Amino acid sequence: MKISSQLSIQIMQHFSQKICWSYHQAFVLQGMYQIALRDKNEPLVSWIESEFDQLIMEDGEIAGYKKTEYNLDNIYPGNLLLILYHKTQKEKYKKAILTLYSQLKSQPRNRSGGFWHKKIYPWQMWLNGFYMYGPFYAHYALEFGTKEDFENILQQLYLIESHFKDKKTSLLYQAWDESRKQLWVENENGCSPTIFARSMGWYCMALIDLLDIIPDDKDHKNLYFALLNAAQSLIDPILIFQNENDGMWFQVMDKPGHKGNYTETSASAMFVYFLYKMLRKQYCADSDHKIFEAARNGYKGICSKLSVDENGLFHINGVCKKSGLGRNPYRDGSYKYYIEEPVISDDDKGIGAFLLASLEHEAAAEQ
């Protein structure tokens, strides 16, 4: 049995968390759902659907969701909503989808038109936000939306590509404060000061998943090719900063070998997913062999972070628990901050990323 299948069944059998409206739980369920469909595992499909269904009331209200927070992270579970609506045509799912869309339509923006990451983060765009809302927004726009919705997605992508990139490495910073009022702004472009690998990983996944959704046709060509160019431009930087020793990527991505830095599991899994999928979809303009070797070595490195306990249960180790900017106590986005955040096992972000990386690795192995 494939490791992704084993882990998915383990999660189903030993799931102890209370289901809630959160991107990190939805991230795990999304990976499990793809695996269940691949495996034609109907009990797993039904379990995921029943767990998620508890969050949607009959009138379409979403348990635990507050639109007034204007939190882009809370859009991500909408991807599962779309799946369930397509399958069941239940009106309550459609109403919940419209609720999330209404948030995007009224999401606070900076002067350049960029979505604030949350209401509590005024004027700030965060790189991981593009993954949290991008695929849902694109799916919605394709089925129910307007030309303006696609233009909005393109506008957000343009701002990210224009303001977040480090000119020296072509990697992207975690956040941009247009107002330049945050204490973590340490450079002339208003970005946070450190290249945080997982934020790069979220962005890579957003680009490759959006390319699944946006058609390559005359009505969408500007957005499609902007996404493709952005994705292709990240391949070389990702390969350059891969650790030769274990095939993984460092928590502070552009400072390999610096004191206290370590190879981090969730970000590494995201890059593996991105590289394998770029190959599978034939989006790469570079040597396929070089990219394949990088993805394969990365996956080996991630697997070295797995452990099995005395009960035969898998554990995914070496995951940064959380990292952000601002708030109280103040998170300054420094190198010291990122390397000193807790490193834990079995974090949802690590599990979800590993499931997706395994899906692509296993697909590549079957070719």
Image: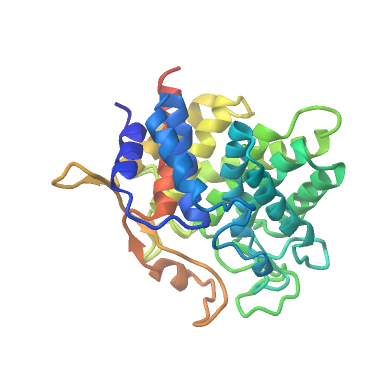
Residue occupying the far front of the picture: 58
- Asked if residue 226 is positioned above or below residue 22 in the image, the reply reads above
Q: For the point 57% across and 53% down, which residue is it? A: 57
Q: Residue furthest left?
A: 310
> Can you tell which quarter of the image residue 347 is in?
bottom left
Image: 127 above or below 240 = below
How far from the left and from the top, in percent, is residue 247?
39, 42
Q: Residue furthest top?
A: 367
Q: Is residue 336 left or right of residue 108?
A: left
Q: Position of residue 319 (x, y in %)?
A: 38, 56
Q: Residue at x 64, y 42 (%)?
A: 207
Tell me if I can see residue 269 in this picture: no
Colouring scheme, one of rainbow, by chain, secondary structure, one colour? rainbow
x, y percent for residue 308: 21, 44
**The C terminus - image quarter:** top left
In the image shown, does 189 or 36 lie closer to the viewer?
36
Q: Please state the horizontal and vertical placement of residue 66, each as a whole percent of the image.
A: 62, 65
Picture quarter with the N terminus? top left
How many labels were placed on the picture? 0
The residue positioned 60% from the left and 29% from the top of the image is 286
With 137 as the anchor, is 65 left or right in this view?
left
Residue 259 seen from this side: yes
Residue drawn 60% across the image and 53% down it:
171
| Position of 159 relative to 242 (above/below) | below
